[in-house]
Amino acid sequence: MAYRETEKMRLRKAEVRERILDCALQSVSEGGFRNAQINQVAEMAGVATGTVYRHFESKTELFAEVFRRATEREVDKVAEALAGPGHAAERLERALRQFAERALHGPVMAWSLIAEPVDPRVEGERLEYRRAYAEHFERAIGEGIEEGSLPPQDARLSATCLVGAIAESLVGPLSPTQRTPTLPEQPATLSDGQIQTLIEPIITFCLQGVTGQRR
Amino acid sequence: MAYRETEKMRLRKAEVRERILDCALQSVSEGGFRNAQINQVAEMAGVATGTVYRHFESKTELFAEVFRRATEREVDKVAEALAGPGHAAERLERALRQFAERALHGPVMAWSLIAEPVDPRVEGERLEYRRAYAEHFERAIGEGIEEGSLPPQDARLSATCLVGAIAESLVGPLSPTQRTPTLPEQPATLSDGQIQTLIEPIITFCLQGVTGQRR
DNA sequence: ACAAGAAGTGAATCACTATTCATTCTTTGT
DNA sequence: ACAAAGAATGAATAGTGATTCACTTCTTGT
């Protein structure tokens, strides 16, 4: 009995795992899930193909985790915006803005998270991701109803509609300009001005949907 | 010079093509795009694998056409609902109801059209499909603004939000219950009562979004 | 009835990559 | 320094299902 896993090794393994995850994330944020390959990720991370399998069950599992991670960042931002001061409607507005602005600034990743065709296992993560958003929105709406700043409504459905409305209106602007399928996904970069013009009517629609009040 | 394509042959070919298309459509409506295979479709249609390729460039092309077809039916229904009598808001309501009810009654196909991960070529069709809906809605909203029954707004964005909101709120109810990936997609069948309960708040949100009026 | 041209056939092939695993390299405790 | 236990390697493999194509069958005009 000679080798016993030591702290040093545990750390090193964790580092490698982390590096693989980072590289996979980067790969996705550059070319989407479609163009992300294990060999390529392994090379980026400076490890052999097989090593990836020492750390992740399968490609799917790896990318599911990548998705989860990228997602958490985004959801956290929205949660943060919702946690700030103000009435429910104001907080929702901040959160929706946050969501849209971030998406439009990192179009490839956003598109991958929102709309890219992915394998079912990853699609499962996407459902959770959307549900996570919806839950945050739902809570805020629920609070709004309680404090009387929002009319009574099915908070869950409204929240879902919010997520759908905003995601859908971003899909067009985000979707990679159609090209030769072999070329990497092409992000549609937008100016800040364009971004604002796009966001305003979306926010209006969403808030009206929730408040039932013209704005 | 002996064989000259004749009307009879043209018809027969068209029939075969049609049959293949029908079978592919049925295959999708039973198991989604994921589980649709060329061999299987060929068998269903009573032709050899190769024959499929005589009528369609590739699997992708075949299923893109399947998607287009299924889609046209749905879009037509919505267009019909929008074409009826009444103010813009009433017509929109009818159309949204139509959309949601149909989707919830044919959940596998609806899920395939709305949310199933599909290959990029087919995804392209999906974008068009969603755009087609959005265009119809956009027109109705535009008319509403003109006739003064709806407040001024960016009709296109509002329309997009409508599509997103309704599609998103249907994804949950439609999405196949997670099971062994090899088993066919499992539709979540809903009672008429459940369907109505689900639809009501969605409609409310959507109409409020468009009208800015509590209902 | 014949030959030319198409359409149909389906077993064999191909393409694509995720995954494996026999081998080599590292780490650890004695 | 040694042996035991992992960890890493990456070339080879495997699984999947789309696609091909040499051959057969059918249609048509003469």
Image: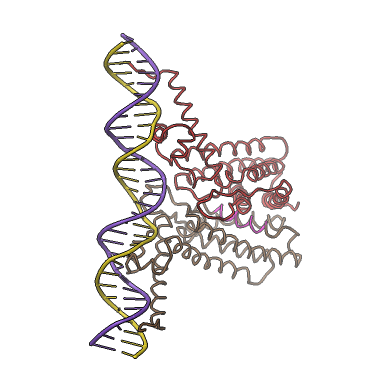
Chain colours: A red, B brown, C purple, D yellow
Quadrant of the image for the C terminus of chain B?
Answer: bottom right
Residue B118, placed above or below residue C20:
below
Q: Is residue A44 left or right of residue A213?
A: left
User: Residue drawn at (75%, 53%), measured in percent from left and top?
Assistant: A214
Using the image as rendered, state which of residue B99 and residue B190 is in the foreground.
B99
Can you tell which quarter of the image residue B90 is in?
Answer: bottom right
User: Could you say where residue B122 lies in the image, as x and y percent from the top left?
Assistant: 49, 58
The residues colored magenta run: B157-169
Residue A82 seen in the figure: yes
Using the image as rendered, state which of residue B90 and residue B9 is in the foreground.
B9
Residue B78, placed above or below residue B120:
below
Quadrant of the image for the N terminus of chain B?
Answer: bottom left
User: Could you say where residue D12 lies in the image, as x and y percent from the top left?
Assistant: 30, 40
Verify whether residue B14 appears in magenta: no
Using the image as rendered, state which of residue A122 and residue A211 is in the foreground.
A122
Q: Which is the main secondary structure of the residues drawn in magenta?
A: helix
User: Residue drawn at (40%, 81%), measured in percent from left and top?
Assistant: B5
Residue B70, placed above or below residue A158:
below
User: Could you say where residue A7 lies in the image, as x and y percent from the top left?
Assistant: 44, 18
